Image (cartoon, helix red, strand yellow):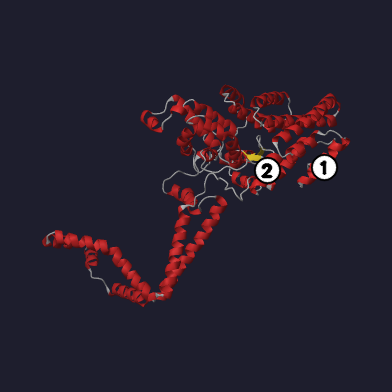
Amino acid sequence: MPLYSSLMTAAPGPAMFGTESSLSMFLNTLTPKFYVALTGTSSLISGLILIFEWWYFRKYGTSFIEQVSVSHLRPLLGGVDSSSPSNSNASNGEADSSRQSVSECKVWRNPLNLFRGAEYNRYTWVTGREPLTYYDMNLSAQDHQTFFTCDSDHLRPADAIMQKAWRERNPQARISAAHEALELEDCATAYILLAEEEATTIMEAERLFKQALKAGEGCYRRSQQLQHHGTQYEAQHRRDTNVLVYIKRRLAMCSRKLGRTREAVKMMRDLCVFQLMKEFPLLSMFNIHENLLESLLELQNYADVQAVLAKYDDISLPKSATICYTAALLKARAVSDKFSPEAASRRGLSTAEMNAVEAIHRAVEFNPHVPKYLLEMKSLILPPEHILKRGDSEAIAYAFFHLQHWKRVEGALNLLHCTWEGTFRMIPYPLEKGHLFYPYPICTETADRELLPTVFHEVSVYPKKELPFFILFTAGLCSFTAMLALLTHQFPELMGVFAKAFLSTLFAPLNFIMEKVESILPSSLWHQLTRI
């Protein structure tokens, strides 16, 4: 104990004074070049971290530092253990999620696609812009070969010519081949090509489709009688069925565009019944019920719209923006005319209003791009011939035809405006899982950029990738230290003056407060405080 007391009360030895003096001498001998080198080194390290963070963010969509902090540091600090039992089936869940993403990123033919000659080409003539991308038109060429050709086309000369015509890239070559086929016989697919690409008006297209219908019905009756005679005749009958359904659907669309909506509804109802009777897989790709829904909304026949939704808005059937947003429109129609956000905040939402809001949230979760087009926050363009479900292309196709129906329902757009952004508070972020649907697929942006003309249209992206804080912080630190290093190297004396002025300005408020405190407090009290 005496030894311990003597050690504690002993004065500092010469070793300690020698260390302090050597440290002071070292700091006094440092030149401005050392500080320049130190600042430049920190700037270089910050730049390397910035480049790595940016590369990692562009590749994986997240910050590396944030990911390491969440995955490794948080468990050490008492957070959630990353190896908890809930993650035992993570690999299976990721596999299922990836398979679902692949299926949901499938490109579908637009049920309401416009006529290439009478609408898309007229837009090009007026504006000088190409509304269709090469990728979109190439998909259409593949669809036409699937719908309108079969292995037995070589048995009929006109069909053999049309089989080559559908593979032609040059529009004029396709049109010339169609005329050549018509010189041999009445060929339904030749009339289809001319109606789609050569006709410059809807009336002209309808006339050609009526001729195609006459020729197509004859081929369908003949192949129907021979379909059981072999696989070759069965394939021919399947092709003739596709041709007949396509012609009737386009005729119904012509009637809808020419104002004969009731006639169009009757034709579409017959097609829906025909589609249910036939078991050919390709018929389901036409999605004729979406054409029917749009026409019924034009007639404001909401009871029939609800009946169609009851049949197709089923959990076992694939969803679409038309299905989800039409269901939301019907529920919004019941309350939108009297809806007031101020009154709802005071008294709360009624049951009907809650159902409408939930329907809007469901629709927005399925396709979050639609509201900006319906609310006219983004400008519309002509819809493509193919769409990606839950993508920007589907949103454009839906809003292009259904915006008028939302405007017709009083207060519907106001209700949508007040409630649609609330959807994102219910969806987990990052989008590791959905709320009512599968997680939003990550492949939509790439596919939409192939389908939409990005020259004059800005593709809508969800979720919007925002730069993480660490990337912004590292970029700012790198730029600031690099600037300090450059200025200190070029103007060492001037930078010293600026540094002193900066420090004096920084401590000026503190000095001012200390002076005020000294003037207010008695000198004896202030003396006692400083001694403490």
Place residue 498 in its image quadrant.
bottom left
Measured as percent of width and height from the top left, residue 161 is found at 84, 40
Measured as percent of width and height from the top left, residue 279 is found at 73, 27
Q: Which mark is residue 177?
A: 1
Residues packed near mark 2 inside 10 Å, few (<14), some (14 to 19) or many (20 plus): some
The amino acid on which the numbered mark 2 sits, given as a three-letter code, is: Arg
Report whether residue 314 is seen: no
Image quarter of the C terminus: bottom left
Q: Which mark is residue 122?
A: 2
In front: 17, or 274? 274
Name the residue rendered at 42%, 25% in the picture.
350
Q: Which mark is residue 203?
A: none
Circle 2 SS class: helix
Q: Alpha carbon of mark 2 to alpha carbon of mark 1: how far?
A: 22 Å
Q: Are marks 2 and 1 in contact (CB under 8 Å)?
A: no
In front: 180, or 506? 180
Image quarter of the N terminus: bottom left
